[in-house]
Structure formats: C-alpha cells, structure tokens
Image (tube, rainbow, N blue to C red):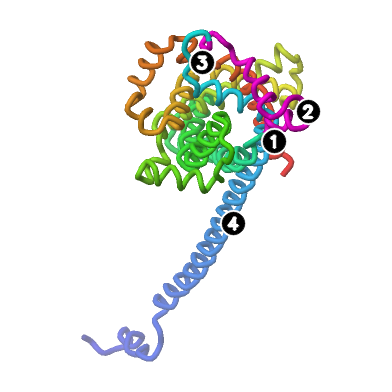
Amino acid sequence: PPIGPAAAPRLASPHRRPPGIVAGMAPAAGSSTSSSSSSSNSSSSGSTSGAKAEWRVAKDFAAGGVAGMVARTVIAPVERIKIIYQTRVLTGAAASQGWLVLFRRVVDDAGGFGPKGIAAFWRGNTVAVVRVFPYLGVQLSSNEYYRKSLQTASAGAGISLSPEVRNFVAGGGAGMTAVITTYPLDLARARMALLMEQGAMQVPSLLGTLRHVVATEGSFLALYSGAGISMTGAAIYCGLKFASYDASKGFCQRHLLPNSDGPPSYLHRAASGGLAGMLAQTFVYPFDVLRRRLQTGGAEAKAKYPNTIVGFWRLYTDEGFFRGLYRGCSLNYLKTVPNTTVYLALFDFLKERF
C-alpha cells in the first residue's frame, strides 16, 4: 500500500477503539439494560396477576362453600325425606303411598312431636355439610374460573361464543370437577342416611362408612360406585343451571319483578336461582334416582344397573315413568327451589362483598 498522507489516519489509530465499535456498543448496552428492566417488570406483573387470580379462586371457593352450607341446612328435612323415598323399592299397597307419609314416620321414629322429633329431620346434616362445603366450593369457583378462561381463550382465537354457550360449557365442566373431587363423601352420606332410615341403632362415622365400603366391596373403586352416571348428570344439570341462571336474571328483571335500571337486585337473583334449578332438575332427575340406587345398593345394584341406558330401562320397566324414573321429583322441587335460590344468590352476594 502507498505510504503517504492518505494512509496516516489508518496507521495512527491502533491504540484507539474505532468510533464505529464504540458507537455500536453503546446502544447494545443500553438495549440490554432496557430489555432486562422490561423483562423484570413483566415478570413481576405476571406473578402479581397470577397471585391475584389464585386469591380470587380461593375466595370464590370459600364463598361457594359457605353458601352451600347455609342452603343445605335450610333444605335438610326435604333432602332426608327424598333420599328415603328414592332408595325404597315398594310393592303392593305401599307403592301407592306418597312421600308425605314419610314426614310423619320420621317424627314417630324419633319419639313424636317435640324437640327430638324436629331435630330428627336434621339428623346426618353435619355429614352433608362436610360434603357440601367442598362440593359447592369447587363447583362455583370452577364455574367462575372456566367461564373467564373460555372468554379469554375464545377472544384470543377470534371465536365469538354467546354467553349462554359459554355458561353451559363452563357449568358442565364445573359440575364434573365437583363430582370427581367429592364423590366418596356423597356416597358415604347416602349410605349413612339409608342406615338411619333402616333403624340402625348405631351409624358409623363418615370415615368408618368409607372404610366399611372398601372392606365389604373389596376395592377403593367402590367409593366411586355410580360416579360415571353422577358426572354425566352433573355436567348436564350444572350446564343448564348456570346458563339459565344468567338468562333468567334478565327475564325476572323485565317481567317478574320489573326494574330495568341498574344490575339485577338480590330478589331478581333469588328468583332466577329458583327458576334455573327447576329447569335443570326437570331434565336430569332420572340421573339422580339412578345415582342413589347405585350408591346404596352395593354389588346387587351394579349388576342390576350396569350402565346408564340399561339402568333407565330397568327403572322404567320395573317401576314406571313417574314412580321409577321420576320417583320423588315433586318432592325434589321443594328442595331444589330453595336450595338454588339460597346458594346462587348468597354466592353472588359474598363474591361481590369480599
């Protein structure tokens, strides 16, 4: 290369950092700092929102559990009569007797009218409440979680879901989740109620009943006897209940208790809960009858009702439509209306206040 004035600048800079490198490095360092800060902020924001979401689910679970306990205690007398009526298979003159006679029978078995006779209707309610707290806690909090998740996922995918479809799918998922997590408690409660109805002098505890089921039927899976039919019924029932509950709020606001201003009142919500419960129960009641037979009948019931279709057919052919598939349905309306009215309206109240 030629040596002259033109080459001097290139030869005179071996001990200096070329300006281009310095200029190139400065933005890179700044960019790294900025990226690091942004990543830290987004990570912090994500963990905060995640903690808030988890806390919301925990609060919904507690609110649902409390609402369920209150509602279950209110309808305990009707629930006890319903279980007795559903699980008895009567023939002859006894088959023509309705469920009203069972109220008198419970009182007579407890020694007549008086404090003991009245308290007899709440016998076994403690076990029912122990089961209902996690059951409705899981069901109501899961419904809220699934509904919000579906809304977010459908918006992200550019899919438009109507509120009714979203509520039905979320409610169905919530119903199945609640059943699978608490089913052994429900089975134990039904077995204990049957022992009480049969006049057992001593009824084992909740844990004792669960141990007895496993020991006599030979498998842990015996605790989930009838769980398949229960999950199917719960999915349909909860899907219909939650979908119709929100739809009924608008109907009640316009027609039953006219008030178009502002959000639905607690009276609107209570009326909507009753309507939603009646509608859903009418569709799925045969599932409830079959579930009780499987829970209380042991191995004999499993052989008689091996699956849902055969079970429904046997109930219909052996006992008829109203006295088989819909046995005790009118009684169940007395339970369902106040039950759903109380826990859905109370859950909304607790969710908003806390």
Please tell me whether mark 2 sits on a helix, a strand or a loop. loop
- Residue at the outermost left position: 1
> Answer yes or no: do the residues labelled 2 and 4 have beta carbons within 8 Å?
no
Check residue 126 in the rendering and tell me which mark sits there, or answer none: none
Disc number lying in front (2 or 4): 2
Whichever of labels 1 and 3 marks the residue nearer the N terminus, that label is 1
Magenta stretch: give its range: 94-122
Q: Position of residue 177 (x, y in %)?
A: 47, 39
| Residue that carries the numbered disc 4 in the rendered image | 48
| Residue that carries the numbered disc 3 in the rendered image | 327
Q: What is the distance, in whole Å, between disc 1 and disc 3 at their CAs?
A: 26 Å
Q: What is the distance, in whole Å, between disc 3 and disc 4 at their CAs?
A: 51 Å
Task: Indicate the quadrant where residue 293 lies.
Answer: top left
**Left or right: 127 as drawn, with respect to 185:** right
Please tell me whether mark 3 sits on a helix, a strand or a loop. loop
Q: Amino acid at mark 2?
A: Gly
Disc number lying in front (3 or 4): 3
| Residue that carries the numbered disc 2 in the rendered image | 114
Whichever of labels 2 and 1 marks the residue nearer the N terminus, that label is 1
